[in-house]
Image (cartoon, rainbow, N blue to C red):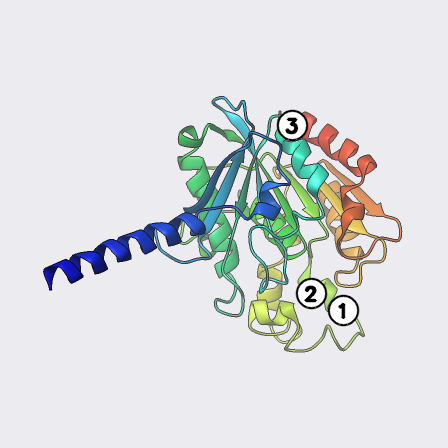
Amino acid sequence: MKTNCLKTLVLFIILSVSLNTVRGQTPARIEQIFPAGTITHSNIAYAGDTLQKHLLDIYLPANAKANTPLIVWVHGGAWMLNDKYADMSYMKNTIKGFLDNGYALASIDYRYSTTAPFPAQIQDCNQALDFLYKNAAKFKLDKNRIALIGFSAGGHLASLLALSNNNNVGAFHPSGSKGQFKIKCVLDFYGPSDFIAIFNNPDTSINNARNPVAILLGATPIDRPDLAKRASPVTYIDKDDPPFFIVQGEKDESVPNTQSKLLSSWLTLTGVKNELIVVPNAPHYGEMFDADWIRQRLFKFLESNLK
């Protein structure tokens, strides 16, 4: 009896270790994107709980030393899809460039709008940033040189986080008060910036309660303009905001490119440095956003604002 129990216990431990090992690994398809020798810390719990959506990964250059500047990756997926590996497959050269140029990358997960309505997503992003700031020395990161990069819904969250950072919006932080971290700059790829403006559109597919924005907010912006304004990055723009590098496709079928133009205009009027690229004939996402000419301008922007 004791022998059987012992065997069962040993088997359970072996299985548990095996499962944890698999859970802690980065998928091979993602590992292949990064330069050889990249130091990876996978599936780090940033919120002190066991939620699968409260995990982040850190990727460091092979020769990383203390105080490595950090770029935080916020994935897209309509606030209800994908994970912290999303968008990487079509941005391979940009990712490789980050590491080759001495930047660390952290990719974060956040709760879906289908299980936790706004502001849960921005709370998670802020909590992840707070964790990275407080644990920067442990992972050889520079807590004073942090940038954000986001795609689509992730672009919205990255922009919202950066622009609201100096407004101390208590509801955007799990603790009710903002952390100490500051954002040096933002790389915003086709993120919505003004939910009220985006709904001033005759397209009935946009103006209905099953639209991703309505699911995020719990109501359409037409019915709850107060919520739409609260969740819109442009609401929080002021002269003390960080520089923005904004990229969107000319023929984006999901987010009107006027959203990026509007964001750029508001930043410019307020005196915030920004650069806007509208990619000719480009759709909502894809490898065209990893083009050499865009990367050249992106890394020049980072050289000026993060190095």
Q: Identify the secondary structure beneath mark 2.
A: helix
Local secondary structure at mark 1: loop
Quadrant of res 8: bottom left
Q: Of the numbered discs in the image, which one, if any, rests on residue 165?
A: none
Residue 140, given in percent of the width and then of the height, sits at: 46, 27
Q: Which is nearer the eye, 177 or 6?
A: 6
Query: Which residue is at the front of the view, 300 or 31?
Result: 31
Query: Which residue is at 40% across, 30% downward?
Result: 138
Residue in the image at 89% along x and 53% along y: 281
Look at the image and tell me in which quarter the N terminus lies: bottom left
Q: Residue at left 54%, top 22%?
A: 63
Q: Between marks 3 and 2, how big is the CA–CA gap?
A: 40 Å
Q: Residue at x 63, y 76 (%)?
A: 223
Badge 3 or badge 1: first in the primary sequence: 3
Residue 80 pos. (x, y %): 58, 65
**Label 3 sits on what residue type?**
Asp
Q: Amino acid at mark 1?
A: Asn
Q: Residue furthest left?
A: 2
Residue 226 vertical placement versus 242 (above, below): below
- Mark 2 Cα-neighbour bin, 10 Å: few <14, some 14–19, many ≥20: some
The residue to which callout 3 is attached is 100
Q: Position of residue 190 (x, y in %)?
A: 73, 52
- Which kind of residue does numbered mark 2 sit on? Ile
The mark found on residue 196 in the picture is: 2
Cα separation between marks 1 and 2: 7 Å
Front: mark 3 or 1: 3
- Whether residues under marks 1 and 2 lie with C-beta atoms below 8 angstroms apart, the answer is yes
Position of the C terminus, as image quadrant, is top right
Q: Which mark is residue 200?
A: 1
